Amino acid sequence: MTENPLGYEKISKLLKNFAVPSIVASLVGSIYNIVDQIFIGQGVGYLGNAATNVAYPFSTICLAIALLVGIGSASRVSLCLGRKEPKAAAKAAGNGIVLMGIFGIIYLLVGETFLSLLLKAFGATDVFPYAKQYASITLIGMPFLIVTTGMSNLIRADGKPKYSMVCMVVGAIINTILDPIFIFVCDWGIAGGAWATVIGQIFSFILALRYLWRFQTIHFEKESFLLDIKESLKICNMGISSSSNQIAVTVIQIIQYNSLTYYGALTKYGTDIPLAACGIVMKTNAIILAIVVGISQGTQPIIGFNYGARQYHRVREAYLLAVKWNLVVSTIAFIAFQFFPQSIISLFGDGDELYFEFAVLFMRTYLFMVLVNGVQLLSSSFFTAIGKSLKGALLALTRQTFVLIPLTLLLPLRFGIMGVLLAGPVADFSAFMLSVVLVGIELKKQKNSLII
C-alpha cells in the first residue's frame, strides 16, 4: 500500500478555504460580547463592564451546549462521509439539529427561573441590578445562539464554511449598528446593549436555519429528524471534549470572580476594579482564542474525513499546519498584551489610576503564556475529529479543571490576589506540555500504520 499524497500546497489551500471563514465566524461570535463591552463601558462606565462580566458565564454555558451538539454532530457527519455512509451522516445531522432546539429552550427556561440565584453564585456584588437587567434580556437570545453556532459546524462539515461565516457576520454587523443607537440615542443604557445582541442573534439564526434546504453532501429524510437515543449519545460523546472545555471555562470564571472580589476587598483595589479588569482581559484574550478555535474548527472536517478514509499523512499535515498558524497569531498577541496593555484596556472605557494599574498587571501576568495556550485547544479538537473523544476531553479539562481551578484556589492563600493572576500562565504551560506528549504519540502511531 502506498500513500496518495495531496501535497503540502494543496493541504494548505484546502485548510485556508475551511479555516479562514471559520476564523471569521468564530471571531464574530466573540465580537458580540466585545462590542457590548466597549459601548457599555463608554456609556455606563466600568461598573457596567463589571455587570456584563458577571453575566458572561451564561454565554459560556450557552457555547458549551452549542459545541456539545454542534461539534459532536459535525464530527459524526465528517467521519460518516469519509466512510461513505451518507444515510448515517444525515441521521447524525438531523438528530443534532433537533437536540440544538431542545437544549436551547430548556436553557432559556432554567436561566430565567434561577436568574437571581445564578448571578449571585457568579459573584455579583454592587453591580447586581445591572447584571440582572442585562442577563434577563440576553438569555432570550440564547436558544437562537445555540442553533446558529451548532448549525455553523454542520454547514462547515457540508463544505460551505463561507456561508457559515456570513451567518455570524450579518448578526454581528446588526449588533454593532444597534448598540450605539440603543445605548446612546435611545438612552436605554445596559439594556440597549442586551437588546442589540439578541436582535443580531435572531438574524444569524434565520440565515443558519435557511441552510436546511441547501445541504449538498447530506440528503435529509423525515427519519433523519426522529430523535434516536443511541445517535444522540454518539453525538454528545463526540462533542464532549469541546463542551467540557467550555464548562470548565464557566467554572473557572465563577471561581475567579469570587476570588477576585474576596481578595480584592483586602487590597487597595476593592471588589469592583478586579471584577471589571478580569472581564476585559478575558474578553480580549477571547479574540485570540476565537482565532484558534476558528483554525481548529476549520481543520476538523479535513482531519475527520481523511482519518475516516485512512489517509493519515493528510491528517498529520493539516494538524501541523494549523499549529504553525496558531503560533503566528499567538506571537502577535504576546507582543500586544505585554507592550500595549493600557492602549487595549482604554478601548473599554475610562477608569481611575488604580483601575488601569490593576488591569495592566492582570493582562501582562495572566496572559504571559499566550504563546503556547492555543496548542491545547488545537490538540483537543484534533482528537475529537479522529473520534478519540476521551483524549480530547482529557486535554480540554487539563488546563481548566486539573490545573487552573486548584491553583486559583490555592495560590491566593500564599500570594493574595496576585495568586489568581499567576494561576493562568502555570496552567497554560502544563496543558501545552501534555498536548505535545499525547499528540506526538498519536502521530507516531499513524505514521507507522498502513495507509491506503
Image (cartoon, grey):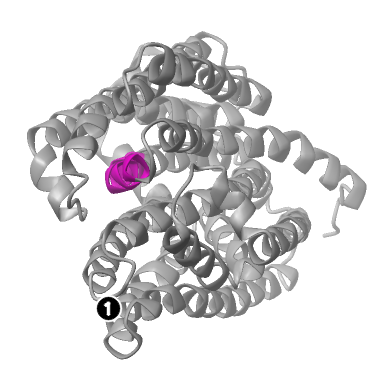
Residue 382, image x, y percentages = 59, 57
Q: Is residue 384 left or right of residue 111?
A: right
Question: Is-magenta flag for residue 50?
Answer: yes
The residue that disc 1 covers is: 409
Residue 22, image x, y percentages = 63, 36
Res. 98 visible in picture: no
**Dot 1, how many residues are within 10 Å of its Cα: few (below 14), some (14-19), or many (20+)?**
some
Which of the 4 quarters of the picture holds residue 408? bottom left
Q: Nearer the viewer, residue 147 or 222?
A: 147
Res. 152 visible in picture: yes
Magenta residue span = 47-62
State the quadrant of the N terminus. bottom right
**SS class of the residue under badge 1?**
helix
Which of the 4 quarters of the picture holds residue 2? bottom right
Q: Residue furthest toward the front? A: 353
Q: Nearer the viewer, residue 275 or 232?
A: 275
Q: Amino acid at mark 1?
A: Leu
Which of the 4 quarters of the picture holds residue 266? bottom left
Q: Nearer the viewer, residue 209 or 232?
A: 209
The residue shown at (17%, 52%) is 125
Residue 299, image x, y percentages = 66, 46
The residue shown at (26%, 31%) is 134
Q: Is residue 98 left or right of residue 12?
A: left
Looking at the picture, does residue 108 appear above or below residue 270?
above
Question: Is-magenta flag for residue 413?
Answer: no
Q: Main secondary structure of the magenta part?
A: helix
Residue 249, image x, y percentages = 37, 57
The residue shown at (49%, 36%) is 38
The residue shown at (73%, 73%) is 448
Q: Is residue 261 left or right of residue 183?
A: left
